Image (cartoon, grey):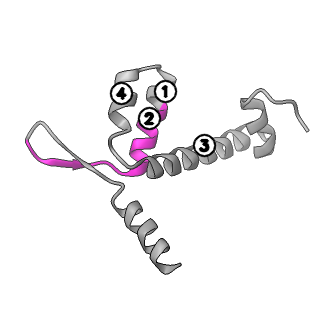
Amino acid sequence: MFDRLRKSFDRFLDSTRTEATSQGEKRTHNLFEAAAAYISACADDDQDRIDETVTWVSPEALSFGVSELACRAVIALARERDESPQTVARSLLGLPAV
């Protein structure tokens, strides 16, 4: 069990990758930066940026970042609209209210 936990944690730590900057330095992207760039590229329907951002971190880290971004966005919209997060999430997905 501890071995699986350690491997999972190691994959999470390895999730940040580096890319060369214009000065030849290495630039590290964190999973939240990758998630924000990925979601904005999807919203703009920019396939080149989507393809680039998916290489910044591991798929697991990107999935976690996108999920965290979705949670934060729903909470922010719920506060702004003075509605419950469930109501906002269902509305965004076009689902009927419960």
Q: Which mark is residue 49?
A: 4
Q: Furthest residue to the left?
A: 23
Q: Is residue 64 above or below residue 50?
A: below
Q: Which mark is residue 42?
A: 1
Q: Residues within 10 Å of mark 4 (few under 14, many from 20)?
A: some
Q: Residues within 10 Å of mark 2 (few under 14, many from 20)?
A: many
Q: Residue at x 32, y 54 (%)?
A: 16
Q: Which mark is residue 70?
A: 3
Q: Are marks 1 and 3 in contact (CB under 8 Å)?
A: no
Determine the secondary structure under disc 2: helix
Mark 1 to mark 3 CA distance (whole Å): 13 Å
Q: Amino acid at mark 4?
A: Arg
Q: Which residues are magenta?
A: 24-39
Looking at this view, is 52 or 79 the one in front? 52
Q: Residue at x 79, y 44 (%)?
A: 86
Q: Which residue is mark 2?
A: 38
Q: Per the image, is 55 magenta?
A: no
Q: Which mark is residue 59?
A: none
The mark nearer the N terminus, 2 or 3, is 2
Q: Are marks 1 and 2 in contact (CB under 8 Å)?
A: yes
Q: Are marks 4 and 3 in contact (CB under 8 Å)?
A: no
Q: Furthest residue to the right?
A: 98
Q: Residues within 10 Å of mark 3 (few under 14, many from 20)?
A: some
